Amino acid sequence: MTPNNIVNMAALSGLDTIAISDHNTIGNVKAAMEVGKSCGVNVIPGMEVETSEEVHILTLYPSLEAAEVVAKEVYKRLPDIKNKTEIFGEQIHMDCDDNIVGYEDKLLISPADISFDELYDLVKSVGGLFIPAHVDRHSYSVLTNLGFIPEEFDIKFIEVSTATTDLQSYLQARSDLKKYKVFRNSDAHYLENMSMKDAFLDIDDIKDLF
């Protein structure tokens, strides 16, 4: 899952646009964006943030600079726990040529000390998209951990995982979700899990998403 392998696999799969959304970090987003420019693949900077309620939020940004603002704050809020490479593996930073340029010592899989509400305000302040992730799952889901999606926030999108194969039946059974637009993605942790080009959104510029 190096920057070059990810972006080139996307190109081979016929994907025009992908998002890099690692857990609580954007450490390899810049490199992937640089590779994307040379391959003709739009790479949206993103991050999957785990809030203090242990809710996963997919966040997408109109620019790398916007993503950096949120990533810096999330990193500060992570507990000061050292990564155990023998258990969790190495947390590697790479450049656009897949050279290793550093390692992240702080464990990134921990929840950050930032609430759902705080993260929403922070992401919106930089013009990002705030998308409750895999709302259909029994863990790390806003519906499981909070029991509902707070109505006071202007949340337009939710993500439903591909584990729910009959999306329409799921949504019909959940009348509380009908007002949201649904994101579906591969959530690929391995190259072989990347989706083919089966979802389409016609836009003139990627920034139109925001």
Image: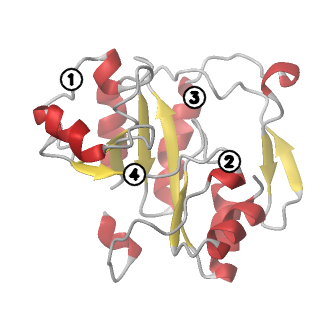
Q: Which of marks 2 and 3 is nearer the N terminus?
A: 2
Left or right: residue 37 versus residue 129 is: right
Task: Give the quarter of the figure containing the C terminus.
Answer: bottom left
| Residue corresponding to mark 3 | 76
In the image, residue 141 sits, relative to residue 42, either above or below, namely above
Classify 48 as above or below 97. Answer: above
Disc with the residue nearer the chain's start (1 vs 3): 3
Front position among marks 2 and 4: 4
> Label 4 vs label 3: CA separation?
30 Å
Q: Which disc, if any, is residue 148?
A: 1
> Which of marks 4 and 1 precedes in the sequence?
1
| Residue under pointer 2 | 27
Camera-near label (1 vs 4) is: 4
Q: Nearer the viewer, residue 190 or 38?
A: 190
The amino acid type of the residue labelled 3 equals: Lys
In the image, 207: left or right of 168?
A: right
User: Which residue is located at x 19 percent, y 46 percent?
Assistant: 180
Q: x%, y% of residue 50?
A: 48, 28
Q: Circle 4: is it few (<14), some (14-19), or many (20+) Cα within 10 Å?
A: some
Q: Where in the figure is residue 139, as x and y percent of width and height?
A: 44, 20
What crowding class fits label 3: few (fewer than 14 Cα within 10 Å), some (14-19), or many (20 or more)?
few
Question: CB atoms at circles 1 and 4 under 8 Å apart?
Answer: no
SS for tag 4?
A: loop
Marks 2/3 in contact by CB < 8 Å: the verdict is no
